[in-house]
Amino acid sequence: MKETESRPPEREQLPRHIGIIMDGNGRWAKARGLPREMGHKAGSKVVGEIIRHCKKIGISYVTIYAFSTENWKRPQKEVDALLDLLRQYLSNMEEYQKENARLRVLGEVDPLPADLRESIRRAERESAGNTAITVNIALNYGGRGEIVQGVKRLLAEGIPPEEITEETLSQRLYTAGMPDPDLIIRPSGECRLSNFLLWQSAYSELLFMDVLWPDFTPEHLNYALHQYARRDRRFGGV
Ligand code: IPE
Ligand code: IPE
Ligand code: MG
């Protein structure tokens, strides 16, 4: 089935926030007889192009799932290659400044190597005043872990049980102050969330696509946005 569209929908039909579970890099490499790391390299090149397209058409928030808390289970060589690509991506400050993009990292940063932590701090600090689009990179991110750390923060702050609400917990998640994702896209044909934005996806529209992430183009995103524009969101109402 054709999963591309040459143009996006009208601006007022667009989601404010989209989440992307980038998946299929390994299969893309395997199909070409290449090591998995080459798939990640190809996949990382797509990220900038898709973010620029999001900005151009008027999407305010994009969250990219780049490395899950479960991805440490992969062979060390692959983990190292993934962290290297993230290091490169996060050090590319000229690109964010040029695009006026604000960069945030969602996830548990403390266990990451010191230089990567430093790149994250710098990228977040230097892009903090940028206003065209917010790009969240979910790195060492897990939805369950995020909720647990939110609960720990509530307890550490001594918040009494009667003040624990959806709102007070939301404010202690990595996405505090941001709108929930309206649309979550997962390429590669897998139909699962794999621990991505579990709390925030309560009413997200989900779209699973067959294309592998390194083959994903702005035209695939346009297709996803048209699918979203056709959905009837009800939030439990009629
Ligand atoms: C997604 O591609 C990249 C990350 C998880 C970081 P995969 O590496 O999961 O690719 P497949 O699913 O094995 O094809
Ligand atoms: C989810 O993809 C994690 C990221 C995209 C970073 P995986 O490829 O790790 O998920 P599973 O193992 O297929 O569920
Ligand atoms: Mg995968």
Image (cartoon, rainbow, N blue to C red):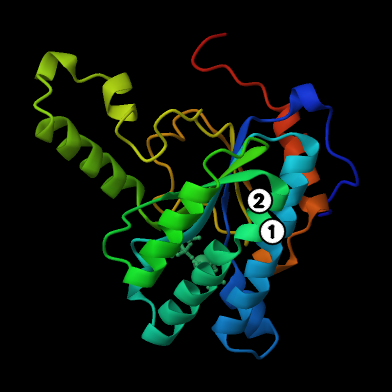
Identify the residue position indicated by label 1 in the image: 48
Q: Nearer the viewer, residue 147 or 187?
A: 147
What residue is rendered at 43% in x and 34% in y? 200
Q: Nearer the viewer, mark 1 or mark 2?
A: 2
Q: Quadrant of the N terminus?
A: bottom right
Quadrant containing the C terminus in the rendered view = top right
Q: CA distance from mark 1 to mark 2?
A: 13 Å
Tell which circle, 1 or 2, labels the residue nearer the N-terminal end.
Answer: 1
Which percent across, then down, holds residue 112?
Answer: 32, 67
> Between residues 63 and 207, which one lies in front from this camera angle?
63
Mark 2 Cα-neighbour bin, 10 Å: few <14, some 14–19, many ≥20? some
* Residue under the point 74% across and 50% down: 52
- Residue 138's place in the image compared with 88, above or below, is above
Residue at 18 percent of width and 36 percent of height: 153
Q: Quadrant of residue 233?
A: top right
In-image side of 132 versus 71 (left or right): right
Q: Which residue is mark 2?
A: 97
Kindly identify the residue that appears in the image at 39 percent across and 40 percent down. Answer: 198
Q: CB of residue at label 2: within 8 Å of ligand 1?
A: no
- The amino acid on which the numbered mark 2 sits, given as a three-letter code, is Gln
Side of 22 where 81 appears, left or right: left
Residue 34: horizontal and vertical position, in percent? 64, 89
Q: Which mark is residue 6?
A: none
- Is residue 53 visible to the viewer in this orientation of the structure? yes
Q: Position of residue 98 (x, y in %)?
A: 72, 51
Task: Residue 3: tell me if it is visible.
Answer: no
Q: Amino acid at mark 1?
A: Gly
Mark 1 Cα within 10 Å, few/some/many (few <14, many 20+)?
some
Q: Secondary structure at mark 2?
A: helix
